[in-house]
Structure formats: C-alpha cells, structure tokens
Image: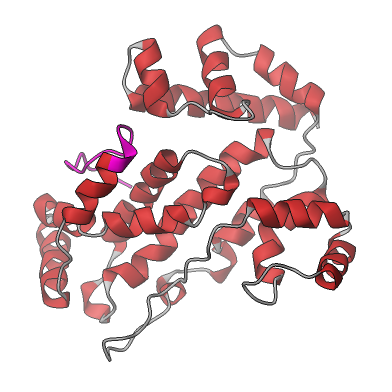
Amino acid sequence: MTTYALPVPSASGSLDSYIQTVNRFPILSQSEETELARRFRDHEDLDAARQLIVSHLRVVVSIARGYMGYGLPQADLIQEGNIGLMKAVKRFDPERGVRLVSFAVHWIRAEMHEFILRNWRIVKIATTKAQRKLFFNLRSMKPGLDTLGSEEVRSMAKQLGVKNEEVVEMETRLGGRDVPLEPANDDGEESYAPIAFLADPAAEPDRVLENKQSALLQSEGLQKALASLDERSRRIVEARWLRESDQATLHDLADEFGVSAERIRQIENKAMQKMRGIIGAAA
C-alpha cells in the first residue's frame, strides 16, 4: 500500500491538545463524504482523502479508549488506529451505500490489535498457550457486559485450563468498554457490517493474531534477545515495554535521543523483529 504524507495532526505531542483538535474537525454529511470519496477514487485527489481522514480522527480516539485496559500508551494506540483509518479510506467504495465510519471501524481495530500483539507478545502475555487463548477470547466468551460471577469464572477457567485468579486478572486488564463494529442505525438508513466488505473471513483480526501465538516465550529467551540489541535499541525497548509503570511514549524518547518520533518507532520495530526472531529460534 502506498503511504501518503497527508497533513493530519499527530498524537505524539500533547494528547489532550490532539483530542481537542480532532474534535473541532466538522463531521461530513453522507453526500459530502460520497463526493470526496469519488474524487479520491477517480482522480487520486489527496486533499479529498485528507478531508475524509481528519473528519474521522475522533472515531479513532473513541475506539482507542476501549483498549486502555491493555496498559499501552493511548497516544500510540491512536497513531496505529490512524494508520487503519488511512487504509480504510484507500479501500472505501462510495457506491456501496455504507458510511465510511461503518467500514473503517474494522481497519482501525485491526491495526490496534496488531499493535497490542506486537508489544504484549514479548513482554506481557503469559507464556502458556491457555493463557494466550484467554487473552484473546475472554471478551467473546463473556455472556454479557457485566463482571463475571464466581460460577462463570470457574467455568471459563476450566474451559481454558487456567486458574480462576487468572481469569479475574485478565478481565480486569481488559476492562475497557467494547466498541461495536457498526454504529447504531438511528437515521433510518440501511447499514452493513464491515465484514461484508472484506475478502476472507479467516483473516478476521482476532483469529490471525491468535494464530501467530506459536512461540513458547521464556524469560531466558527474552534476556538473550535484549542482550542482542545495541544500547539505544535496548534502551527504547526497556523504556517502552519493560517498565511496570510510567512507560515512555515515542515522543518522550524522541526528545531524549534528539530524533523524530517516527525514527524511534522505526528503531523499536526493528528491535522487536530481531527479538522475535531470537525468541522464536530458541523455542
């Protein structure tokens, strides 16, 4: 996919300021949205794409709030969600009669899921297959939105082969509110589920992410992987993902090393890829 250098606001600075900024962008009417989408599709009008993106940045912020229970920086979740929004704009077909927000939610969540996996996989997810299964399936297995009762906790723990305490702990971590895949249909218009516009049901993000959990992660392997990094890369990984609290953001580390937040992200991704290769080889 081609990456467009669109002048959209960045969440790597003051998060409160960013949220205030994106909430000031006007919401497009359906006719305006359709016209802009056609301009982008037919004429590769990047200004039209920019308008579609900035008018939906508030949606990304709203979805990111639902993932605060994972313990990852909200600004980084928003940045990843924005990438998903851009992918959605790229693939959006205005002739299908569905609003962009309904289509984009899937892509936004997919990028956030991938980001969570990328950063919990090495450090935060427990090492057993059953616990990783619990991580991805707790929400889908819950009968409702209320807190699990003691009988439900025991039943779920038995199904997944984990302790009762682990079910309770994971539910607490994932306590952020659920975000529906499509908005409430309050305007009388016909609505469609985003999955109807995707190619392969087997590529549903939850399934893809769970299937990637094949390596048995051991603490010795993590230490070996960290030792393989250069000093700067190791500092970035440790500051971002190995602290119990006060985790550094991309912007914090960019100031420390005197480079851009994007450069920190590139170093981090390269370090994570190297560590995954070492841990996978040792499994």
Q: Is residue 40 above or below residue 222?
A: below
- Using residue 4 as the reference point, say whether residue 107 is left or right of it: right
- Which of 92/52 is in front? 52
Residue 3 belongs to magenta span: yes
Tell me if residue 3 can be seen: no
Q: Identify the residue at image location x=25%, y=40%.
A: 17
Which range is magenta?
1-16
Where is residue 147? Give x, y as percent: 69, 67
Question: How is the protein colored in the picture?
Answer: secondary structure
Which picture quadrant has residue 90?
Answer: bottom left
Residue at position x 44%, y 43% in the image:
74
In terms of depth relative to the viewer, which is nearer, 115 or 282? 115
Instruction: Decide if residue 65 is on the left or right side of residue 12.
Output: right
| Residue located at (52% from left, 49% from top) | 68
Residue 267 position, x and y percent, is: 46, 22
Residue 171 point in image, percent of width and height: 69, 57
